[in-house]
Image: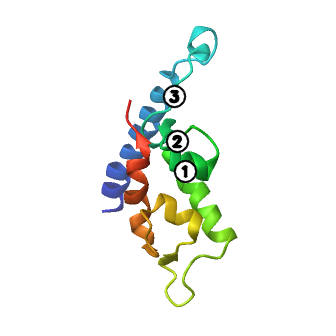
């Protein structure tokens, strides 16, 4: 019975190792023209033009969604705006109210939805 498991699983491991080695050999080298090609950021990493209200908050005319979320969270943590009794709730000050439609309180999961209209589609 032991030879059965060795034969079945041992051969599988050998096949997987051979497949990994062939995949590594098939990779394109990163020298010459292939290395000179830069990838453009896509999705949430792509810089987009922002609304005037968000521009005033950030101080930049365009930003990526991921960077905006980081800066908003940095601002929230710096000014201690999370509700102490419910950490999922953000208590907005005057500066945050300008980008969160004048709301007094915002839920953690609402932030992305409230920031979405501030990104101008081109």
Question: Where is mark 2, residue-wise?
Answer: 64
Q: How many angstroms separate mark 3 from mark 2 (CA)?
A: 33 Å
Camera sees residue 113: yes
Expressed as whole percent of the image width and height from the top left, the position of residue 49 reads 49, 36
Question: How busy is the neighbourhood of tag 2: few (under 14 within 10 Å), some, or many (20 plus)?
Answer: some
Q: Which one is closest to the eye, mark 3 or mark 2?
A: 2
Whole-number angstrom distance, CA of label 1 to CA of label 3: 37 Å
Residue drawn at the location 49% of the way across and 58% of the way down: 99
Classify mark 1: residues with Cα within 10 Å, few (<14), some (14-19) or many (20+).
many
- Up-down relation of residue 23 to residue 97 (above or below): above
- Mark 3–mark 2 CB contact (< 8 Å): no
Q: Residue at x 54, y 83 (%)?
A: 83
Q: Position of residue 56 (x, y in %)?
A: 60, 49
Residue that carries the numbered disc 3 in the rendered image: 24
Left or right: residue 89 compared with residue 122:
right
Q: Nearer the viewer, residue 9 or 66?
A: 66
Which quadrant, please, contains the N terminus? bottom left
Residue 22 drawn above or below residue 101: above
| Residue at left offset 57%, top offset 71% | 93
Instruction: Say whether disc 3 or disc 2 marks the residue closer to the N-terminus.
Output: 3
Which mark, by number, is residue 68? 1
Give x and y (percent) for residue 100: 45, 62
**Local SS, label 2:** loop
x, y percent for residue 5: 33, 57
């Amino acid at each position: 019975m032991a030879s059965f498991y060795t034969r079945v699983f041992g051969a599988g491991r050998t096949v997987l190792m051979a497949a990994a080695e062939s995949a590594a050999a098939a990779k394109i080298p990163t020298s010459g023209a292939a290395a000179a090609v830069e990838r453009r950021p896509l999705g949430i990493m792509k810089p987009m033009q922002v609304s005037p209200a968000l521009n005033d908050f950030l101080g930049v005319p365009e930003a990526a969604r991921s960077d905006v979320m980081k800066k908003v969270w940095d601002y929230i943590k710096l000014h201690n705006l999370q509700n102490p009794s419910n950490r999922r709730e953000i208590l907005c000050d005057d500066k945050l109210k300008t980008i969160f439609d004048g709301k007094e309180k915002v839920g953690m999961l609402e932030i992305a939805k409230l920031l979405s209209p501030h990104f101008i589609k081109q």
